[in-house]
Image: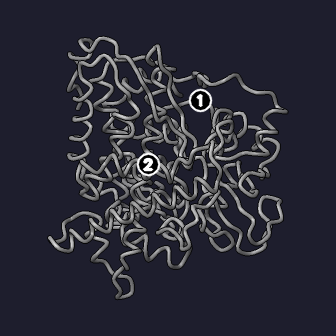
Amino acid sequence: MSMLKIAIDAGKCEGHARCVARASELFDVDDEGQSFVLANPVPAGQEDAARSALEACPERAITITEV
Amino acid sequence: MSANQNPTGHAEPEEADSATIRALIEKFSVHNRESLENRDAIFREMRESCPMARSSAHGGFYAVSRYKDVYAAAHKQDVFSSFPVTIPPFGNPTPMIPIEMDPPEHRKYRTLVGTQFSPNTIEANEPQLRAIVNTLIENLQGRPQADLAEEVAIALPLRAILEVYLGVPEKDWAMLKKEFLYMLEPDPEKSDEENNERAMQAGLNCSMYFAELLEERRTNGFGDDLISHLAQVEIDGQRLTDDEIFGFCLVLVPAGFDTTASLLSRLLLMFTERPEVREQLTAIVDDPDKLDLAVEELVRYIPPQPGVARNVTTPTTFADTELAVGDRLLLLWPSANRDPEEFPNPDELILDRQPNRHLGFGSGIHRCLGSHLARLEIKILLQEFLHRVPTYAVAPDAKPLWHTGNTWGVSELPVVFEDWDTVGASAGQGE
């Protein structure tokens, strides 16, 4: 069974934190507001949340790949 | 699919013909009342037939209107400088911190306040912000009429930044607001020179006020407010100069209230023009996940800031246009947010819109520092206001007063309320 893996391009992330708002189980922000991934690969049942986060990122900094 | 399929129903003047619109484009300015009143038609015409439109206003500039171009320009620090960030410029000799700074200095200064405006810090301020909202609503309760711009839309973000962030005493809020509005909303009837002179004086007055505040904190001990924080931080082992501290405050205060005030005032006006918007928001306001999407859509649909400037520092070709050093661009966020290439049915307010990569908070390294504060202010206001304030109409003998400037919004919104008894039962509803 394939799994989803999330990556954030740190060079593109500007701290909008939309990923955290859409998928708080999968993303968090550090003290300065930069996002990081909490859970990789994406746990079962969180796939839609992961896609929602990707679609919400205004900097297009998130990629999701099937592994 | 969204439940909301209503077209835009702005209570605006009838749409002008295309020759008129083209003439308006040639003198487009965020300080021009005709630009504001015809914005939807102007932006549509720009996107469709002149995506790098040339305006002759304020010495001339290119108006960038398509989503992909606005987005690209916001990420080209290598050829576009953010100083000055307005057209016309404020006239400050050194860049405003951090909004007019370019890399690599920008990051050093921006990082100083990153924690203060991070989602986690903002979340911790939630009780204080909710208390402010409650006070504002209690002030309205039972009254036949009110000015919702002055008493809610402007008051909430003004108090949030002055009270919660800077610890400014209540007696000084009105004075600071007035001075800042000279800078942000120049009188469109006056010349650039006259407005500039008044804005410089206002900047000086505010700097002097912040100087007193800083002196008072240095004497009586630092607190957890922003000025105390800025007085103690270091860049490369050096404290900020006093001028840098005032400079920071001169940006953060107006950026903190005039923007959110613009969105809230336009939203509260929209409730009178399109009652279904209020009904749709009321239906989802207690669902945090749906409210999260709805707030983003509101920021897409009624972004406060019409545009920011970029200045060409290296000759370049951008959007099929040859640009020379010194050429100026105005990045039109509201136009980008209505680009059908990026947003299906862009003129519809679709509260559960996804994807929604709007540019209402800007994009790139200058992404709105206060965006998380703004989102929370909007959310809390909706949660309290929709359940506790009855429907209302614009007062029969009055009309809303729109303002031009570096934000577009409503500065006077006189309304008469329906029966306050109708909302008593649902007060305090929610999660």
Tell me where residue B345 sits by quadrant: top right
Q: Residues within 10 Å of mark 1 (few under 14, many from 20)?
A: some
Quadrant where the C terminus of chain B lies? Answer: top left
Viewer-closest of B176 and B30: B176
Viewer-closest of B211 and B164: B211
Tell me where residue B389 sits by quadrant: top left
Q: Amino acid at mark 1?
A: Glu
- Disc 2: host chain: A
The x, y position of residue B355, in whole percent, is 54, 43
Residue at coordinates 25% horizontally, 71% vertically from top-left? B215
For label 1, the residue is B348
For label 2, the residue is A47
Residue at coordinates 53% horizontally, 28% vertically from top-left? B1
Location of residue A57 with respect to B76 vertically, above or below: above
In this orientation, does residue A58 appear? yes
Q: Is residue B54 left or right of residue B379?
A: right
Residue at coordinates 65% horizontally, 50% vertically from top-left? B191
Task: Give the secondary structure at mark 2.
Answer: helix
Task: Give the secondary structure at mark 1.
Answer: loop
The way the protein has been coloured in the rendering is: one colour
Instruction: Choose mark 2 or mark 1, whichever is in front.
Output: 1
- Disc 1: host chain: B
In this orientation, does residue A22 appear? no
